[in-house]
Image (cartoon, helix red, strand yellow):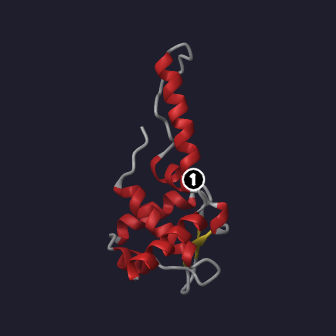
Amino acid sequence: MFTFTTKSRYGLSAILEMAKNYGNSPLHVKEISTKHNISPQYLEQLMIRLVKPGLIRAVRGQKGGFVLAKPPREISLMEVLEALEGPLAITQSTHQDDVMIEYAMQAEAALRRVLDVPLSDMMARQEARALMFHI
């Protein structure tokens, strides 16, 4: 079952921070964890989940850290959430003749469409909200 957990919120905060920093030097876990009040050890675990599917990559060395593996417009919220939480599945059944399964599959498809938003769009919305609250 797919749910929005602390793992999702923290992982999304971290990858959005990297998206804002796209094209600049790598971000250290400590930088992100301090800014978002996340345990560095927990954030490390989340970063590993984001590295595995190729959403971010680790840069080694003294000036190392983490960066997006591709531009923010090429990474969707759905990809991030599935990397952190596992595949979206509203139902586990495959009996196509069950009417409830049909509705569950439609709901899953609708949720996928909603969550198929690129990080760049999320960043723009986040910036617009920040401006509204400063007015």
The quarter of the picture where the N terminus appears is top left
Residue at (45, 72) in percent of width and height:
129
Mark 1 Cα within 10 Å, few/some/many (few <14, many 20+)? Answer: many
Residue 79 image offset from top left, x and y in percent: 57, 53
Question: Outermost residue, bottom direction?
Answer: 62
Disc 1 is placed on an element classified as helix
Residue at 40 percent across and 82 percent down: it is: 135
Q: Which residue is mark 1?
A: 79
* Quadrant in the picture for residue 63: bottom right
Name, please, the residue furthest toward the front: 135
Q: Up-down: is 40 above or below 62?
A: above
Q: Is residue 95 above or below residue 109?
A: above
Is residue 54 rendered to the left or right of residue 91?
A: right
Amino acid carrying label 1: it is Glu
- Residue 50 location (% of width, % of height): 53, 60
Q: Is residue 7 above or below residue 65?
A: above
Choose between 76 and 45: the one closer to the eye. 76
Give left or right: position of 67 versus 39: right
Residue at left 43%, top 42%?
2
